[in-house]
Image (cartoon, rainbow, N blue to C red):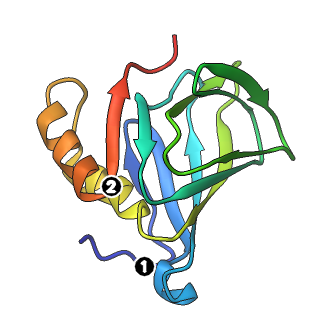
Amino acid sequence: MVEVSASEVHTWLGTTYRSILAPMASSGAMSIVDSVSPAGSGPPRHIHHTEDETFVVLTGRVKFWLEGEEFVKGPGETAFISRGKEHTFKIVGEEPSRHLLILTPGGFEEFFFEMAAGQFAIPSDTPAIQASAERHNMTLTGPPLD
């Protein structure tokens, strides 16, 4: 586990992550991460087995892929991803996206902090990334959005 204070900013692959509500502040019920992702960025397809994710888009535009369906959310809009659903997203347009990531229950944000601490690269560090994903109840299932 990576120790993180509420004011620390962690950067991995150009995306910054800052915990604004740690799981311990909600008895593990939830956590909130303030994230800024550069234009064109996004993770591989994946499934969270134990967490629901709510994205609150503050700036930029985010294209989501959720079990074969695509939709775009912009500032002031929200996307909810139920646990167990295959999904990914990509920042579209020229502007970075700042969004809040609400995780219920909390704890998955440790994956981001581990990745930032190790500065793991894709694809060269894929085994380490997959091992961390498994520790955090996530399965990587496919490529990022084009």
The location of residue 16, given as percent across then percent down, is: 48, 49
Residue 5: mark: 1
- Counting the numbered discs, the total is 2
Q: Mark 1: few, some, or many residues within 10 Å (few <14, many ≥20)? A: few
Q: Residue furthest top?
A: 146
In the displayed structure image, the side of residue 123 where residue 84 appears, left or right: right
Residue at image coords 57%, 51% = 35
Q: Nearer the viewer, residue 51 or 98?
A: 51
Mark 1 to mark 2 CA distance (whole Å): 23 Å
Q: Nearer the viewer, mark 1 or mark 2?
A: 2
Q: Kindly identify the residue that appears in the image at 84 percent across and 41 percent down.
A: 75
Q: Secondary structure at mark 1?
A: loop
**Mark 1 vs mark 2: which is more N-terminal?**
1
Between residue 112 and residue 143, name the one nearer to us.
143
Q: Which residue is mark 2?
A: 137
Looking at this view, name the residue that lies furthest to the right: 76
Give the structural element (helix, strand or loop) at label 2: loop
Q: Amino acid at mark 1?
A: Ser
Note whether 85 is above or below 102 in the view shown.
Answer: above
Q: Residue 137, image x and y in percent?
A: 32, 55
Please report the residue visible at 77 percent of the width from the left and 48 percent of the height from the top.
Answer: 58
